[in-house]
Image (cartoon, helix red, strand yellow):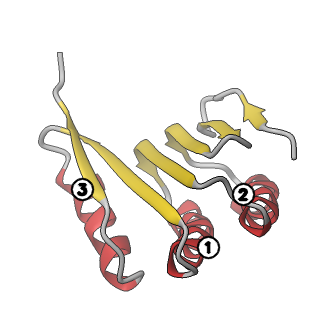
Amino acid sequence: MESLFIEATKKTPEVSFKAEGLITLKGRSIPEDPSKFYDVLLLWVVEYSSHPQPLTTVNVDLEYFNSGTSKSLLNILRVLVDLKNRNNSVNINWHYETGDDDIFERGEYYSSILDTKFNFIEIKQD
């Protein structure tokens, strides 16, 4: 399986999905057509989950995302939580800036509806 890397744009996050088990989304996500952007990522995660590494680390480090992204992100996280529920080691790290209650609460919401523990990592602003 090949890794997937997509550079960030003004409307889409940096994507670094490594076949070695490190999955990262970083930046802002406001694509006009979320499914066009995220369907590729979902397919990669589905393929990865059929032959996962012993440990999968997921880093969600989004400073802002729209409602379309929210649904797509949930679909990706569902596949990863299913992987965890099949007795694979999966750590989900949810990054948020100090004082960004919106991003923090979205992470709590996903953690709750997916019924899985997230590691909340506060990023101090300069």
Q: Is mark 1 on a helix, strand or loop?
A: helix
Tag 1: Cα neighbours inside 10 Å, few (<14), some, or many (≥20)? some
Cβ–Cβ under 8 Å for marks 1 and 3: no
The residue wearing badge 3 is: 104
Q: Where in the figure is residue 32, as x and y percent of width and height?
A: 69, 53
Gap between marks 1 and 3, in whole Å? 19 Å
Task: State which quadrant residue 38 falls in.
Answer: bottom right
- Decide if residue 62 is on the left or right side of residue 109: right
Q: Which of 20 and 60 is in front in this view?
A: 20
Q: Is mark 2 on a helix, strand or loop?
A: helix
Gap between marks 2 and 3, in whole Å? 22 Å
Q: Where in the figure is residue 113, as x and y percent of width and height?
A: 37, 84
Kind of residue indicated by mark 3 = Phe
**Furthest residue in direction left, as rendered:** 99
- Decide if residue 43 is on the left or right side of residue 101: right
Task: State which quadrant residue 4 falls in.
Answer: top right
Task: State which quadrant residue 20 falls in.
Answer: top right
Kind of residue indicated by mark 1 = Asn
Residue 75 has which mark? 1
Q: Earlier in the sequence, mark 1 or mark 3?
A: 1
Cβ–Cβ under 8 Å for marks 2 and 1: yes
Tag 2: Cα neighbours inside 10 Å, few (<14), some, or many (≥20)? many
- Examine the rendered structure and indicate whether residue 59 appears above or below residue 39: above
- Examine the rendered structure and indicate whether residue 21 appears above or below residue 39: above
